[in-house]
Image (cartoon, grey):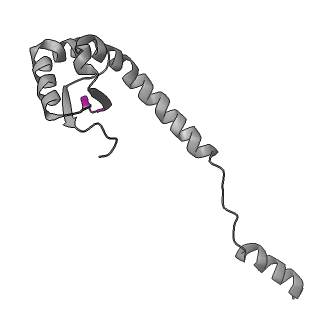
Amino acid sequence: MPDPQQQLDTLRKYRRRRERETSIHDLVAQARQTVKRDEKRLGSLVQLWEECIPPALAARTALTGIRRGVLHVRVDSAATGFELDRVLRSGAEAQLRAAYRGTLVRVRSRIGLDSGG
């Protein structure tokens, strides 16, 4: 029969609470990787956006991402959205498509420059 003290030590080893990982290193590394990827994908697109869209209009928009070939843009008001739609339909969207190295199918605008949903 094993020593009772040995049994207790073995049980304590398995039953004790594990220490939590309190380091944010992994989270920061993941965020850094995501930012690098997004910057790589959107960096050239932002530059193209500023070239193809009139500066006064571009100042009232924010590129929020590109997914499945759809560029998502936030606009500050419905009037800006309408103005952006007119500019895109008059050739800016085709110009963006031709100049962008990735896949760009269309541009979708949404009202509200906030970061939420």
Question: Residue 43's x, y, as percent?
Answer: 40, 20
Is residue 2 visible to the viewer in this orientation of the structure?
no
| Side of 108 where 28 appears, left or right | right
In the picture shown, does residue 92 fall above or below 20?
above
Q: Residue at x 13, y 30 (%)?
A: 79
Say which residue appears at 52% left-offset and 39% top-offset: 31
For the N terminus, the image quarter is: bottom right
19 relative to 36 in the view: left or right: right
Looking at the rendering, which quadrant does residue 18 occupy?
A: bottom right
Q: Residue at x 66, y 61 (%)?
A: 20
Total number of numbered labels? 0
Q: Which image quarter: residue 112?
A: top left
Q: Position of residue 99 (x, y in %)?
A: 27, 11
> Considering depth in this image, is 31 or 110 the residue closer to the camera?
110
Taken as a whole, is the magenta stretch helix, strand or loop? strand
Say whether residue 18 is magenta. Answer: no
Q: Quadrant of residue 101?
A: top left
Q: Position of residue 47 (x, y in %)?
A: 35, 15
Q: Nearer the viewer, residue 82 or 49?
A: 82
Q: Position of residue 97 (x, y in %)?
A: 22, 16
Q: Is residue 91 visible?
A: yes
107 or 115: nearer the eye?
115
Q: Is residue 5 above or below residue 45?
A: below
Question: In the image, 3: left or right of 78?
Answer: right
Magenta residues, start to end: 65-72
Q: Is residue 29 above or below residue 13?
A: above
In depth, the one of 7 and 80 nearer the eye is 80
